[in-house]
Image: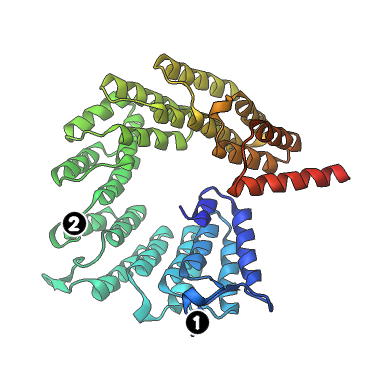
Amino acid sequence: MHPLIKMFANRDVNKAWSVYQSLIQGCEGPNRWCSPVKPQGVEEENNSLVYMGEFLWSSFISGFARCHRLELAEQVWMDMDRFNVVRTPTIYNAMIDAYGKRGDVENAQEIWDQIAPESRDVYTYTTMMSALFQTHHPVEGLVMFEEMKLQFGEGMVNGRLTTRGLTPIACNAVIHGLLICNRPEVADSILDMMRTDGPKPDTVTYNTFLRNYEIKNNMVAFQATLRSIAQEGLQPDVFTYTTILDLLLRTNKENTVGRLFDIMSEMNVNPNEATYTTIVDSLMRRKGKRNIQLALDLAEKMEQEGVQTNEVTYTSIVAGIRRDDTLAPEVSRRLFEEVLNRMRARGMEPNRVTYNFLIEACLQRGGPDGVEEAMMWFRSIGKDWVSYETYVVTLRGMMASGRMDHVQEVLDKIRESGFQPRGALKTLVDNAIRKLQLRQSY
């Protein structure tokens, strides 16, 4: 994963903004080392400047918007004007998406209008349509869909514009939008058109309908859609399975996990260990005691069905429990002990990956209790289990929390172990030492 994408995935907005500001400052002044645009007449291999291309500009806009910092995305947009950066469809798309996800269709439309008609592609059309549907403008969204079919489809079939030639992503976005706007009959007509003209519906297409039927508690339509997935030879994914679980819970079906396995069997699906572990991880990320219990039931059912569980499955559950700030402390402790006991009963002891997950999960939970528990796990790791990643995660977390006593403790353990810091860890260690020295000087 690209470091910038990872920053945004971890919601580390301050770090991403610091990187952005550093790049912008590097674009200015006599000693500039960065270029906002590709220098003209200079071969890339002979150019000493860092070039901020389409990927960086669009990633900063999308990343800040996803982290609910639209004002920072707008600053990036204004800086592009200041540096006379020529925007590509990808960059326009990022800004339309930023406004669309916030429900600001007027600004999204304003950006759309800035794109030359010949530069609009399937992706920008799809994003603008999604913004219209999300803000409950189905008529305008459908008008744009007809424009897209005219522009990128393969002409007329039986007196109507066809979806043939479009991407499943575009059609799925329209179906999703129509279902949001409570226009199921039009969504069904697009599904029929995809079946006859193309592009063929994919798993995402049917997942979109499944989620709608789950919300509306329409069991008949839900089951019919599951049959369509099986009949068309498509493979259900994690979203399919978790939607099935949600419907079973909504309808108060007993033995929810057992029923899920029955449905899988009816669909002639045989998920492997990796699939089940991904479902478990998905449940844990949704938080809440109900989802944790489902994950535990699923792990137990896997074993009953002869599907091998491993440390990865249980590590995902353990980390999820420690990350879940919706649980009361006593509930968190009880569930945590239950999982550790299950692991030990199966001959699985926490390994370095488990410890790293635990430390990171406690730090993500935040607050004094999370920091103290992270240090407890750090102290409990045997010498042979401590890894480079353990030191990086723990030291970074303690510095972010401002607990310099814990920072000193981690540095002492690194020194006593004889471990030689390198790369990101060396940078962290050097910064930590400087901060401690400054603190002692006052």
Graded by Cα atoms within 10 Å as few (under 14), some (14 to 19) or many (20 or more), the crowding at tag 2 reads some
Looking at this rendering, what residue extends furthest in the right direction? 442
Graded by Cα atoms within 10 Å as few (under 14), some (14 to 19) or many (20 or more), the crowding at tag 1 reads few
Quick check: 57 above or below 247? below
Q: Residue at x 60, y 54 (%)?
A: 13
On residue 42, the disc is 1
Q: Name the residue nearer the viewer: 122 or 42.
A: 42
Quick check: 143 above or below 427? below
Quadrant of the rendering where the C terminus is positioned: top right
| Amino acid marked by disc 1 | Val
Q: Secondary structure at mark 1?
A: loop
Residue 347: x percent and y percent? 41, 17
Looking at this rendering, what residue extends furthest in the top direction? 345
Q: Name the residue nearer the viewer: 191 or 318.
A: 318
Quick check: 91 above or below 420? below
Q: State the CA–CA distance, disc 2 to disc 1.
A: 46 Å
| Amino acid marked by disc 2 | Lys
Q: Residue at x 64, y 59 (%)?
A: 18
Residue 325 seen by the camera? no
Residue 438: x percent and y percent? 82, 47
